[in-house]
Image: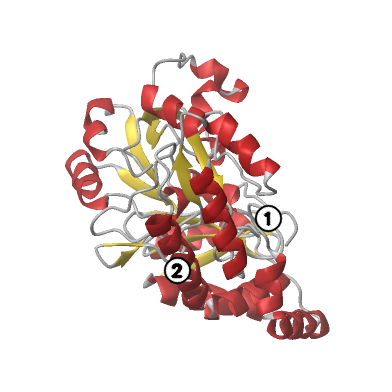
Amino acid sequence: MGKIMPNRLDRGFYKYQAEFEAKALEVLRSGWYILGHEVESFEKEFADYLGAKHCVGLASGLDALWIAFRVLGIGRGDEVIVQGNTYIASVMGITMNGATPIFVEPDEYFNIDAAKIESKITDKTKAILVVHLYGQASNMSPILEICKKYNLRLVEDCAQSHGAKYNGQQTGTFGDIGCFSFYPSKNLGAFGDAGAIITNSDKIAIDTKIFRNYGSEKRYYNKVVGANSRLDEIQAGLLRVRLKHLDELAQEKEKICGRYLSELNNKKFVLPKVRDGATHIWHQFVIRSKYRDELIKFLDDHDIGTIIHYPIPPHLSEAYKYLNVKEGTLPITEEYAKTVLSIPLYNGMTKEEQDYIIRVMNEF
């Protein structure tokens, strides 16, 4: 069987190899490589899939985040509320615009604890950034009420939640802007860097389209100082192929995680929970254990790879030392960083691999 990797991207490629290769050749032979038919078609198809009005393709998920706050006019002197236990890119989207992140602890589902948001609101608060971490939709109802009450913008980081729903509604469609990453390891993954924003606002969509292309609506006529952040034609074409199979790929992961949830029964680690009313697309299957280091070594000795998402919370990273958020300020966030572990999960995982992982983990 060989070593089981935490993630394998080749299996997902081979599953639809003929379609991916045909599409790549089609784009290469078209002679059009930037902002053409494939990008326009993907933008329409992905917006339709989510039930949103607009999708604007960008070069990466991080670009989606920082451009989102830029087009909303959030910057120096403004505060944005975000959960403490997210990937650092979420926070960079805020700080690259000069705004200040205000951290809130997560709930037991690894998402922002809605009950702890209101106490962090000041007259500088301009927005809430909700991260649907690991693929599970966040608790949106109370968050929407808070945004309405305090007239706050709502941005969603959906880098890991393509297709996850809260009360039947797709993540990315609740707020002003939904930010998506199509990094290759995502459930809707490209074959390189790629991202997009989703919005129901015509103005935000137009502003983002202008901003991503050097700030020009028409070539050489620049309205603003923009960026070069365009989803390219090949990635858009390949994403269109995967989008057609996204639900079927999600069901496969759900089946694997269903086995994990029902067959892993070792008291040395805690299994993830799914919130009532939310769906989970299982970008990662994240357990928690006080014996994480020993578990990693044990699994490694048995040729099972794991990853920690994420060992250092943003507020304790060197990059954000200047924010002066001391260790101990966010105890739940810090506890998660010390105990979380992602076990192998990918499309094309064999029954034999699943059986082996379950057996070895139960033996720990």
For marks 2 and 1 on the same chain, the one whose residue lies earlier in the sequence = 1
Which residue type carries mark 2?
Lys
**Front residue (pair 270, 98):** 270
**Mark 2 highlights which residue?**
255
**Front residue (pair 244, 95):** 244
Q: Are marks 2 and 1 in contact (CB under 8 Å)?
A: no
**Residue 238 location, x and y as percent?**
67, 74
At mark 1, the secondary structure is: loop
- Determine whether, in the image, residue 151 is placed left or right of residue 24: left
Decide: few, some or many residues near mark 2? Use Cα within 10 Å; few <14, some 14-19, many ≥20: few
Which residue type carries mark 1?
Ile
- Determine whether, in the image, residue 42 is placed left or right of residue 302: left
The extreme front residue here reads: 363
Q: Which labelled disc corresponds to residue 4?
A: 1
At mark 2, the secondary structure is: helix
**Identity of the residue drawn at 57% across and 52% down:** 61
**Residue 3 location, x and y as percent?**
73, 54
**Residue 208 location, x and y as percent?**
52, 57
